[in-house]
């Protein structure tokens, strides 16, 4: 499977966000985060 082009950028809503740089279809798998929680809310 081909990787999708993504970018982290500042967000006015949630401080940081992950933004798609190309269309993503509903059935496409984008990312699975398995690390620790960086900043609890």
Image (cartoon, rainbow, N blue to C red):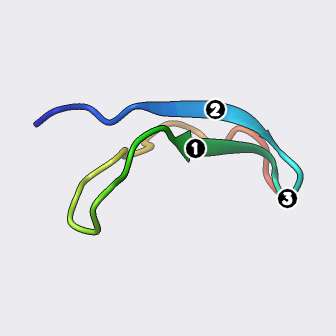
Residue under the point 28% across and 68% down: 26
Q: Quadrant of residue 39?
A: top right
Which residue position is annotated with label 2? Answer: 8
Residue 32: x and y in percent read: 37, 46
Upstream in the sequence, badge 1 or badge 2? 2
Q: How many marks?
A: 3
Kindly check if marks 3 and 2 are in contact, taking CB atoms under 8 A apart as contact: no
Residue 31 shown left or right of residue 35 in the figure: left
Mark 2 Cα shell of 10 Å, populated few (<14), some (14-19), many (≥20): few
Residue under the point 37% across and 44% down: 31
Which residue position is annotated with label 1? Answer: 19
Kindly check if marks 1 and 2 are in contact, taking CB atoms under 8 A apart as contact: yes
Secondary structure found at label 2:
strand
Residue 32 shown left or right of residue 25 in the figure: right
Q: Nearer the viewer, residue 23 or 7?
A: 23
Residue 11: x and y in percent read: 81, 46
Instruction: Determine the CA span between mark 3 and mark 2.
Output: 14 Å
Q: Nearer the viewer, residue 22 or 15?
A: 22
Upstream in the sequence, badge 3 or badge 2? 2
Question: Furthest residue to the bottom?
Answer: 26
Number of the label disc, if any, that sits on residue 13: 3
Residue under the point 25% across and 31% down: 3
Instruction: Determine the CA span between mark 3 and mark 1.
Output: 13 Å
Secondary structure found at label 3:
loop
């Amino acid at each position: 499977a081909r990787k999708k082009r993504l970018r982290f950028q500042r967000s006015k809503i949630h401080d940081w966000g992950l933004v798609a740089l190309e269309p993503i279809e509903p059935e496409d798998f984008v990312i699975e985060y398995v690390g620790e929680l960086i900043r609890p809310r």
